[in-house]
Amino acid sequence: MDRAVPLSHSAVNRDPNTPPRPIRKRKTTINLNGDILTSQDSLQKIKNDQANTAARKAKVVKRGRKTTKKADEETPYDQMEEETDDYSEYSDDA
Amino acid sequence: MPKRTTAEIKVPHRTYVHALVKRCPDLTIKKARILEHDRSQYVTPTTLNDFFDKLQGLFEVGDYSPSMICNFDETMIQCASRRLTVVGPRTSKTLYIPEQAEMPHITLGVAIFADCAYPESLVIYPRKTLPQEVTAEWLVRYRKICYTGQPKGWITAEILEKYLLEIVLPYFLLQRARIGSSHRGLLLVDGHASRINAKLWQSFRDNDIDVITFVSHASHVMQPLDLCPFSVFKAQLRQGVSVMRKMTLPERRQFVMTHAFDALHIALSPIQHCCWIQKSRSCSFGSSRTSESLCCQS
């Protein structure tokens, strides 16, 4: 497998000051960073993670005033009429 | 190498830029590619090599035929993006800038096999019901599209599960029945949170299909779909959009979607396949067997 082409891609960061691993932002134990998702280990990790998340959510008891939440009838697509009225941005017509 | 930063870049005046380029023959003016901060930071040779080590192991065991290698990903149907012009070295192929603000989006999910085959693509609207432009005639015209909805138009674990189990997995089984197909299959996906789904991947495992995720923030370098079909799709989508200025909103919406489906058809054509296999032959579909087979079919 020839790795030269992707490694020479102009978007690859060769700055030696950058840490070799991305800083994780996700709170779960699943990284999804080049993982083989169908391996037994990954499946077990995902199952455990889903069980832990479910248990954590079950523990949370909401205290506070009851409010009736209005059904979300309008979506961003419906609101597009006002937002995308100005189509003068289409200047790069080929 | 200069330090990468997300700080706001001061834009010089146009006359200064043109004078600078005139003075320096090594510089040229190009349209910039948009690149998110994380992508520009964390795609390093180390992370790429780690991924290739895993992929090499899978290829040695699976001996996948092109008809059993699939890549799934989503892209946004966006016609309104404005491309900025920037100055950079004449020798550089592509220049990147940070991502700009976007309008509410419609997601397009595409699965494509290495032998040019592809099942129905997925459109996720940011609404609960189909919009008015999707008529019976439309549905007949664009048969290889299936529709779903989500409040923000994003893909979720549920939508992905339904699409992969009902569309992609059966297609894998059809592909397996073809002459010369390997038994084992390979599905390449990115590391989006919707991929965390044990039930889904267990189904793929039960059907002898391996699933691997790309390294975080590296799909623009590694992913076959990003390397050609999506770039062709987006380039096609940007063409001829000035006619929308005279259209009413429903007409514009219809135009964008029709334009997008036609662009997708071009992007997934066999000619484009040859191009993306050439670009990705050293990435995901690295075996010479795969490349030769695809070139013959194309």
Image (cartoon, rainbow, N blue to C red):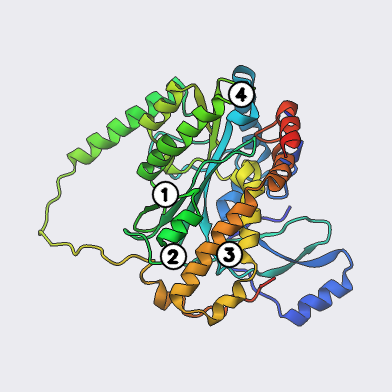
Q: Nearer the viewer, residue A57 or B113?
A: B113
Q: Secondary structure at mark 2?
A: loop
Q: How many marks?
A: 4
**Marked residue nearer the N-terminal end (3 or 2):** 3
Q: Secondary structure at mark 3?
A: loop
Q: Which residue is mark 2?
A: B104
Q: Label 3 neighbourhood size at 10 Å, few (<14), some (14-19), many (20+)?
A: few
Q: Give me the residue at 42% from left, 49% from top.
A: B155
Viewer-side label of 4, 3: 4
Q: Residue B100 shows which numbered tag? A: none
Asked whether, in this view, residue B70 is left or right of residue A37, the answer is: right
Do the residues indicated by labels 1 and 2 lie within the same chain of the protein?
yes
Please tell me whether mark 4 or mark 2 is closer to you in this view.
4
Secondary element under disc 4, as helix, strand or loop, is loop
Q: Are discs 1 and 3 both within one chain?
A: yes
Q: Which residue is mark 1?
A: B155
- The quarter of the displayed image where residue B262 is located: bottom right
Separation of residues labelled 3 and 2 (CA atoms): 25 Å
Q: Are marks 4 and 1 in contact (CB under 8 Å)?
A: no
| Label 1 environment density (alpha carbons within 10 Å; few <14, some 14–19, many ≥20) | many
Chain letter, disc 2 residue? B
- Whichever of labels 4 and 1 marks the residue nearer the N terminus, that label is 1
Disc 3 designates what residue? B7
Judge from the rendering whether residue B18 lies leftward or rightward of residue A60; answer left or right.
Answer: right
The numbered dot on residue B181 is: 4
Please report, as a chain letter, where disc 4 is located: B
What amino acid type is highlighted by mark number 4? Answer: Ser
Judged left or right of residue B20, residue B213 is: left
